[in-house]
């Protein structure tokens, strides 16, 4: 990772207290926050225009830079709404993909049309997971929504990372907050992690606290800065083994979904059983590498080393050689990475050690029925079968 970027991230997370750089970042943050506030007022007063689609729209977003679980939540909602009998399409910006500017269909109910380089890593990952759900990308979410309506006639469109996209009206605004540090230090980028000032939370219809250890409904420990009178739900991240490649096996993004080899595991199995007692080397290029390392340690393996890359990092053959060399030097038995990173790895990589790819699913525990009833009632939807076993 770039040394300056690392230093800025350490200042944001209060691990570095460089006075001069903190003041400079604070000045830029104040200016940026003012611009965002003016933009928000423009939309509230109708000076800047929002457009509406002819179907219901749910936005899954956050207010901080970094991973709060938007993509797993979008997948969770898509599956739940489909179980209730609704046609769903997902629209994402497609950050990092070539189709972000032009827009396009990543997948339809029959096939995946774009690779991760074109679609972006997260839309491609959703297309792999939601095999029967159309996934579209484009910076202009309204235009992508129109494309979805013409091609697939969805009842509901899910906006992945849509809270700041005020050009498109939505019927339900869900905002995800990491329960460990919901708004970080409370400052706007680049001095803090906020993508807009805290008062923007007033636009939300409900909040989902993620990475909680307790999802029991009715808890009273509510963060003080959240607007009163709006529902708050708690969820947890549930890691699972997305897939495994054995030493010497050649693999590429997308092959897990085809279950092409008996050497390949493709199930939401327990990482504890796979990695407990093993020496593991981890690498990731995601927004919160430290959280990933914490998750790896919870599997019961011995973390002997790790490499951190920037978010959405496009891996090269040189990167893979560096990862392999570092893992061997630490005496690791397994290399471990995230599902999001896996789709950005070079094709036909021959793995020098066992590779475990970890995915994340959202779980509401005992609060699941309450959350899904809220979604259905807010959108005036019939309450169908919430559970796969129903």
Image (cartoon, rainbow, N blue to C red):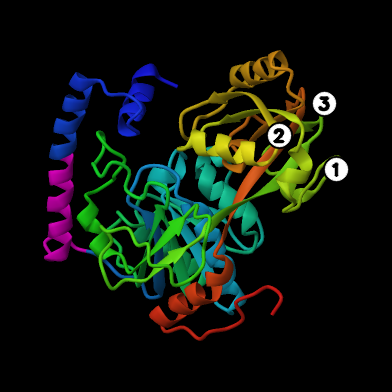
Q: Is residue 71 left or right of residue 35?
A: right
Q: Is 100 on the left-hand or right-hand side of 43?
A: right
Q: Label 1 neighbourhood size at 10 Å, few (<14), some (14-19), many (20+)? A: few
**Distance of mark 2 from mark 3, alpha carbons?**
22 Å
- First in sequence: mark 3 or mark 1? 3
Find out whether residue 47 is within the magenta segment.
yes
Q: Which dot marks residue 248? A: 3
- Looking at marks 2 and 1 on the same chain, the residue that comes earlier in the sequence is marked by 1
How many angstroms separate mark 2 from mark 1 (CA)? 26 Å
Q: Where does the image place residue 22, in percent across and percent down from the top left? A: 21, 26
Q: Secondary structure at mark 1?
A: loop
Mark closer to the chain start, 2 or 3: 3
* Residue receiving disc 1: 261
Residue 124 within the segment the image draws in magenta: no
In this rendering, would 143 be left or right of 277? left
Is residue 178 placed above or below 277 in the rendered structure? below
Residues shaded magenta: 32-49
The numbered mark at residue 358 is none
- Vertical order, 251 against 365 (above or below): above
Q: Which residue is mark 2?
A: 301
Q: Quadrant of residue 386?
A: bottom right
Residue 13 position, x and y percent, is 35, 33
In the picture shown, does residue 103 fall above or below 3?
A: below
**From the viewer's perspective, is the residue at label 2 or at label 3 nearer?**
2
Q: Is residue 112 visible?
A: no
- Give percent across and percent down for residue 180: 42, 48
Q: Residue at x 12, y 52 (%)?
A: 38
Q: Dot 2: what SS?
A: loop
């Amino acid at each position: 990772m770039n040394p300056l970027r690392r230093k800025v991230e350490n200042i944001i997370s209060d691990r570095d207290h460089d006075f001069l750089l903190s003041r400079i970042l604070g000045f830029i943050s104040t200016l940026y926050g003012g611009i965002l506030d003016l933009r928000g007022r423009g939309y509230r007063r109708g000076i800047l225009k929002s457009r509406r689609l002819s179907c219901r729209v749910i936005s899954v977003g956050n207010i901080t830079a970094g991973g709060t679980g938007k993509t797993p939540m979008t997948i969770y909602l898509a599956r739940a709404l489909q179980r209730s009998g609704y046609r769903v399409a997902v629209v994402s910006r497609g950050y990092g993909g070539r189709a972000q500017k032009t827009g396009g269909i990543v997948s339809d109910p029959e096939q995946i049309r774009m690779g991760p380089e074109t679609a972006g890593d997260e839309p491609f990952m959703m297309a792999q997971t939601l095999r029967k759900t159309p996934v579209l990308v484009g910076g202009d979410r309204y235009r992508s929504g129109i494309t979805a309506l013409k091609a697939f006639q969805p009842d509901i469109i899910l906006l992945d990372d849509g809270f700041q996209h005020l050009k498109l009206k939505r019927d339900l605004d869900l905002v995800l907050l990491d329960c460990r540090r919901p708004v970080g230090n409370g400052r706007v980028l680049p001095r803090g992690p906020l993508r807009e000032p805290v008062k923007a939370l007033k636009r939300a219809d409900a909040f989902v606290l993620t990475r909680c250890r307790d999802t029991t409904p009715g808890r009273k420990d509510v963060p003080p800065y959240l607007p009163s009178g709006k529902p708050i739900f708690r969820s947890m991240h549930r890691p699972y083994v997305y897939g495994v490649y054995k030493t010497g096996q050649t693999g590429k993004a997308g092959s897990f979904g085809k279950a092409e080899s008996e050497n390949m595991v493709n199930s939401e199995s327990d990482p504890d059983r796979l990695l407990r007692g093993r020496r593991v080397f981890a690498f990731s290029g995601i927004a919160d590498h430290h959280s990933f390392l914490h998750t790896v340690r919870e599997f019961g393996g011995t973390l002997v080393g790790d490499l951190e890359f920037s978010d959405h990092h496009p891996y090269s053959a040189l990167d893979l050689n560096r990862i392999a060399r570092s893992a061997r030097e630490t005496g690791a038995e397994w290399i471990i990475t995230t599902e999001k990173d896996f789709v950005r790895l070079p094709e036909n990589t021959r793995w020098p050690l066992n590779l475990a790819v970890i995915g994340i699913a959202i779980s509401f525990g005992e609060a699941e029925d309450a959350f899904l009833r809220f979604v259905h009632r807010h959108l005036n939807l019939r309450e169908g079968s919430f559970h796969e076993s129903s």
